[in-house]
């Protein structure tokens, strides 16, 4: 079995996303995993028998590592640290398009691509963009944590409003949300709930609206309880170069609980149009919210759940392991 070292990134228990999912699944397959938080401390936390969360200053004893040692990089600026850690291979996992909010990372991309033995990308647009720039590139989209998102997690959280139908969002409360669209859809007879941490320089001021609720960041294990009590789930992203390279994890999580999803026309969601309501104008978005809340179709619920379950993180990591083996890394 190999040793995987996730290069310093968002702490393990904060904004549980693709890096945590992949590292946890690799550890469950028997590989040793060190997940490095981007916190300059030396702590060591055992998550399971093969998975260790460590601070960025923690000194890993390379003499005791199972070989090969694989550095897993999920953002390009991590290239500046790879030579400070013993390794046999470098994997670059491209999770975002480096434009708009992430354009500052562009200065590191060429060096990261040069250092990488293999590259994974999360979206079709990213594959097309980076295929000419690396000889070993594979598409592995995001997925669903089947264990966490189960139908029995349906107790109503105490901070969810109960007076009207609830339209909900789970994820970063960020600049890539189309806040003009949000203001437009607030002019309706629904309550709008946003669950997630604030990210970036945004000014959320809806003092004149009594039907929008920002509940803040919740524990990862609590998210299914919120989604289960939404009548409709939304992905109100701006449509631009960055968001068109985004394969939203929240989409799989929404669908896994059978919820109708209303989204703007970002490319990765349009590809799943049979399981979503795609909105190309503000007027479409509110009309689709109304339509989704009024729907009474059990076959749609089953279809959504089946789609999500067929796109599990277990399957994604099996694909990753297959590609690593194909390239004689495992």
Image (spheres, rainbow, N blue to C red):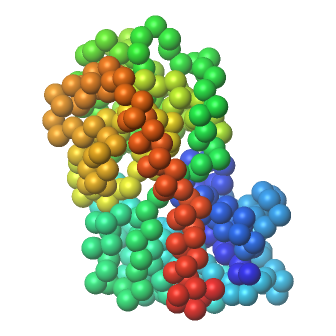
Residue 137's x, y, as percent? 40, 80
Asked if 33 appears above or below 43 in the picture, the reply is: below
Q: Is residue 266 visible?
A: no
Q: Residue at x 74, y 81 (%)?
A: 1
Asked if 101 appears above or below 186 in the picture, the reply is: below
Q: Residue at x 52, y 72 (%)?
A: 319
Q: Which quadrant would residue 35 be assigned to in this image?
A: bottom right
Q: Nearer the viewer, residue 329 or 146?
A: 146
Q: Is residue 151 visible?
A: yes
Residue 20's x, y, as percent? 61, 58
Residue 135's x, y, as percent? 38, 89
Asked if 68 appears above or below 50 in the picture, the reply is: below
Asked if 318 appears above or below 275 in the picture, the reply is: below
Q: Please state if 138 lies on the left or on the right of 63 as rendered.
A: left
Q: Which quadrant would residue 299 be assigned to in this image?
A: top left
Q: Please state if 8 lies on the left or on the right of 32 as rendered.
A: left
Q: Please state if 287 lies on the left or on the right of 18 as rendered.
A: left
Residue 301's x, y, as percent? 43, 35
Q: Nearer the viewer, residue 179 or 65?
A: 65
Q: Which quadrant would residue 186 be assigned to in this image?
A: top left
Q: Please state if 12 lies on the left or on the right of 19 as rendered.
A: right
Furthest-top residue in this view:
163
Q: Nearer the viewer, residue 246 or 35?
A: 246
Q: Residue at x 63, y 23 (%)?
A: 155
The mark total stands at 0
Q: Residue at x 84, y 83 (%)?
A: 64
| Quadrant showing the C terminus | bottom right
């Amino acid at each position: 079995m190999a040793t995987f070292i996730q290069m310093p990134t968002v702490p393990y228990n904060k904004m549980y996303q693709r890096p945590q999912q992949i590292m946890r699944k690799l550890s469950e397959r028997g590989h040793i995993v060190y997940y490095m938080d981007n916190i300059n401390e030396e702590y060591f936390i055992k998550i399971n028998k093969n998975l260790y969360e460590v601070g960025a200053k923690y000194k890993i004893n390379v003499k005791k590592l199972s070989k090969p040692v694989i550095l897993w990089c999920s953002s390009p600026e991590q290239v500046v640290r790879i030579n400070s850690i013993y390794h046999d291979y470098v994997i670059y996992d491209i999770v975002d398009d480096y434009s708009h909010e992430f354009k500052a990372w562009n200065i590191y991309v060429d060096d990261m691509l040069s250092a990488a033995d293999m590259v994974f990308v999360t979206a079709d647009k990213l594959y097309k963009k980076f295929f000419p720039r690396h000889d070993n590139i594979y598409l592995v989209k995001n997925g669903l944590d089947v264990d966490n998102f189960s139908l029995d997690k349906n107790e109503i959280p105490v901070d969810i409003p109960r007076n009207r139908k609830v339209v909900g969002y789970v994820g970063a409360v960020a600049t890539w949300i189309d806040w003009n669209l949000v203001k437009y859809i607030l002019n309706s007879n629904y309550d709008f709930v946003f669950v997630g941490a604030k990210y970036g320089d945004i000014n959320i001021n809806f003092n004149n609206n009594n039907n929008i609720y920002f509940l803040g960041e919740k524990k990862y294990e609590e998210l299914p309880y919120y989604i289960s009590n939404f009548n409709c789930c939304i992905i109100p992203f701006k449509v631009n170069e960055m968001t068109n390279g985004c394969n939203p994890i929240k989409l799989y999580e929404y669908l896994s609980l059978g919820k109708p999803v209303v989204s703007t026309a970002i490319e990765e969601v349009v590809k799943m149009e049979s399981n979503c309501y795609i909105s190309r104008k503000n007027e479409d978005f509110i009309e689709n919210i109304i339509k989704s809340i009024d729907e009474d179709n059990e076959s749609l619920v089953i279809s959504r759940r089946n789609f999500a379950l067929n796109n599990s993180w277990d399957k994604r990591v099996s694909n990753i392991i297959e590609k690593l083996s194909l390239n004689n890394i495992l």
